[in-house]
Amino acid sequence: MAPASPLHRRVGELLTEWCAPAHLVLDTACGGDHRVSLFMGDQKGLENKVCDVDALIVRDRQVRLIVEIEESNIKPTQVCGKFLTSALAGFYSYRD
């Protein structure tokens, strides 16, 4: 896994300060311990995984905000593709 960029780390720090009392889930690039994976359907599995995101804010057992940081490929196809795959997801997994 590639080392975290300074931008990812800084966004993780800012989210940590900003999001209380909600639950913040950070990907390793943003200072967390694991990947944050999104899945379709109701079961975790490679066939159901749609993407990994950089951070989630969860409140009242619902994902309220998904954060994805894209530094290198910011074409509309990349941005729209990540948005659609995130929107299709039914749940996330942070740890097994």
Image: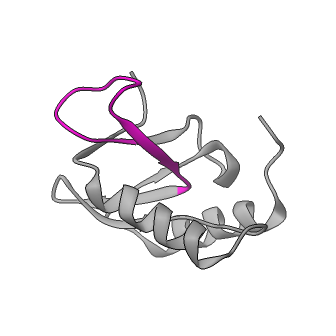
Residue at the outermost front position: 77
Q: Is residue 43 magenta?
A: yes
Q: At 36% from the left edge and 26% from the top edge, which residue is drawn?
A: 47
Report x, y in % for residue 58. 30, 58
Q: Position of residue 13 (x, y in %)?
A: 64, 65
- The part of the chain drawn in magenta is 38-54
The image shows residue 43, relative to residue 10, as above or below, that is: above
Relative image position of residue 69 (x, y in whole percent): 63, 67
Residue 83 versus residue 76 in the image, above or below: above
38 on left or right of 72: left
Q: Say whether residue 21 is visible.
A: no
Q: Is residue 19 magenta?
A: no
Quadrant of image for the C terminus: top left
Nearest the viewer among 62 and 24 is 62
The quadrant in which residue 79 appears is bottom right
* Colour convention of the picture: one colour
Residue at the image position 58 percent from the left and 78 percent from the top: 76
Residue 86 horizontal side relative to residue 71, left or right: left
Asked whether, in this view, residue 29 is left or right of residue 52, the answer is right
Q: Work out which quarter of the rendered image holds the N terminus and state it.
A: top right
Residue 48 % position (x, y) = 32, 32
Q: Residue at x 42, y 28 (%)?
A: 95
Decide which of 4, 21 is in the foreground and name it.
4
**Left or right: 23 in relation to 54:** left
Which picture quadrant has residue 17? bottom right
**Foreground residue, 57 or 47?**
47
Q: How many marks?
A: 0
Can see residue 52?
Answer: yes
- In the figure, residue 5 lies in which quadrant? bottom right
Residue appearing at x 82%, y 41% in the figure: 2
